[in-house]
């Protein structure tokens, strides 16, 4: 069954056969208009076809309008996506300005019927202004209504998405893209596969935005993203990709482009250096491991036996077949980030690298971070004002710890429980 084509702004279509759209997200504060415009300019020049910007509240709506005006006045036409958490009021206001709005309607209100009513209001505005919507559900931030029915599972993610998509169909609104992200590659792949099947059975297949959320950074972040996303793209599932790395967002774009070119049937523009070797191996072997078509791998990259063994370990861990080090979950950061996330992540890794198999999350903000780190044994979350909260399985156990003490306090806590 053909996937619907969703128009974003004047020139971009998501769902076009053979074209996988590359997107990324700003990590600047949206109120810092100069910095956000500069980052969008650089992203657009690097090949981003769609740029997401966080809109934490109503006061940020005029900022995004100005960012868009300034970009357009420079001739930069890359469509903008407003990233909304919780506030339907903000979603409705900003939908009049940007080309696309990303929401999780289940978080619009704790009461499910109220959330549905707010979503209907947003659809009406989007229809009027020609704005697209991404229904973006993440493992760990599903509404209580759905987890009460199905638990915190891939099935719950797919069922929740189907309910919101059905509402779009009932409202005759088809400018919709959907995503079901998780930091766990198996959960993520299962959720997308289930949803794809459910959409086919319903007779309407909306395009899908793929991503492994909170993938971390460096080789591990790239490999984890490639394994999850490539597993779906090679099955013909997915129309746009975002590779989330806890790095400068510009570093995400070459990885996303690699995936878009490789699975869009185009020649790959990334030259054959170390990064290319890593991405090739992750995509060549990760999907077979994740789908249990293979149980082990042996690599011969030409970069030495030690590197080959390391890369095989990384791909096996990203495919969740064998764990040789801790599993790190780290958000990419955005305009809500409350501290130097990249620095904090490196410090936490340095203290905890010996804790094989443990799941440790490092998150940028106290508003969304705790909800998003569903699988973590321990969480390390920026509060703002130089302070950090430490969580054990989603429960805060230490609050207001000065940033320079917090990595040691985390390690002490973990060791005291072993
Ligand atoms: S958890 Fe990270 S990416 Fe998500 S909203 Fe907070 S700072 Fe942004």
Image (cartoon, rainbow, N blue to C red):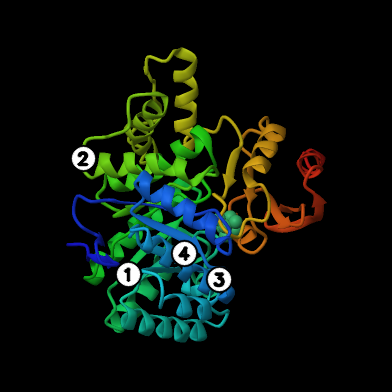
Q: Residue at x 69, y 53 (%)?
A: 381
Q: In the drawing, what numbered circle is on residue 67?
A: 4
Query: How many tags in the picture?
Result: 4
Disc 4 to disc 2, C-alpha distance: 33 Å
In this rendered view, identify the residue nearer to me: 418 or 241.
241
**Secondary structure of the residue carrying numbered label 1:** strand
- Of labels 4 and 1, earlier in sequence is 4
Mark 3 crowdedness (10 Å alpha carbons): few <14, some 14-19, many ≥20: some
Badge 1 is on which residue? Answer: 176
Give left or right: position of 196 versus 59.
left
Circle 3 sits in a helix, a strand or a loop, which is it? helix
Q: Is residue 318 visible?
A: yes
The C terminus sits in image quarter: top right
Rendered-image quarter of ligand 1 = bottom right
Kindly report the distance in space between the C-alpha atoms of the residues bearing marks 4 and 3.
11 Å
Q: Which mark sits nearer the N-terminus, 2 or 3?
A: 3
- Of the image marks 1 and 2, the number of the one nearer the N terminus: 1
Q: Quadrant of residue 250?
A: top left
Residue shown at 54% from the left, 54% from the top: 35
Whether residue 320 can be seen here: no
Residue position marked by numbered label 3 in the rendering: 60
CB within 8 Å, label 2 to label 3: no
């Amino acid at each position: 069954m053909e996937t619907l084509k969703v128009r974003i702004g004047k020139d971009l279509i998501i769902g076009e056969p053979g074209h996988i759209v590359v997107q990324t997200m700003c990590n600047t504060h949206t109120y810092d208009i100069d910095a956000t415009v500069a980052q969008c300019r650089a992203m657009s020049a690097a090949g981003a076809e769609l740029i997401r910007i966080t809109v934490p509240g109503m006061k940020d709506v005029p900022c995004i309008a100005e960012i868009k005006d300034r970009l357009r006045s420079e001739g930069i036409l890359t469509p903008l996506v407003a990233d909304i958490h919780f506030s339907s009021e903000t979603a409705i206001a900003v939908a009049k300005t940007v080309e696309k709005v990303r929401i999780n309607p289940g978080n619009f209100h704790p009461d499910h019927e109220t959330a549905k009513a707010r979503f209907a209001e947003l659809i009406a505005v989007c229809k009027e202004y020609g704005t697209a919507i991404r229904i973006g559900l993440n493992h760990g931030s599903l509404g209580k209504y759905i987890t009460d029915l199905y638990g915190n599972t891939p099935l719950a993610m797919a069922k929740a998405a189907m309910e919101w998509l059905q509402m779009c169909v009932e409202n005759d609104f088809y400018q919709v893209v959907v995503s079901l992200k998780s930091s766990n590659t198996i959960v993520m792949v299962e959720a997308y596969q289930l949803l794809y099947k459910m959409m086919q059975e319903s007779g309407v297949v909306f395009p899908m935005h793929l991503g492994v959320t909170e993938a971390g950074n460096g080789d591990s972040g790239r490999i984890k993203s490639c394994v999850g996303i490539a597993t779906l793209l090679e099955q013909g599932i997915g129309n746009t990709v975002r590779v989330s790395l806890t790095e400068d967002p510009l570093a995400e774009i070459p990885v996303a482009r690699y995936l878009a070119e490789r699975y869009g049937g185009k020649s790959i523009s990334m030259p054959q250096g170390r990064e290319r070797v890593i991405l090739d191996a992750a995509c060549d072997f990760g999907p077979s491991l994740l789908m249990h078509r293979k149980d082990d791998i042996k690599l011969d990259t030409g970069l030495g036996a030690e590197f080959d063994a390391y890369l095989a370990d990384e791909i096996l861990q990203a495919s969740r077949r064998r764990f040789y080090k801790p599993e790190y979950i780290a958000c990419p950061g955005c305009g809500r980030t409350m501290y130097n996330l990249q620095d904090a992540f490196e410090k936490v890794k340095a203290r905890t690298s010996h804790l094989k198999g443990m799941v440790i999350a490092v998150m940028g903000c106290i508003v969304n971070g705790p909800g998003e780190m569903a699988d973590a044994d321990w969480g390390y979350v920026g509060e703002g004002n130089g302070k950090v909260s430490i969580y054990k399985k989603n429960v805060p156990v230490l609050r207001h710890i000065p940033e320079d003490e917090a990595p040691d306090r985390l390690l002490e806590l973990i060791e005291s429980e072993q």
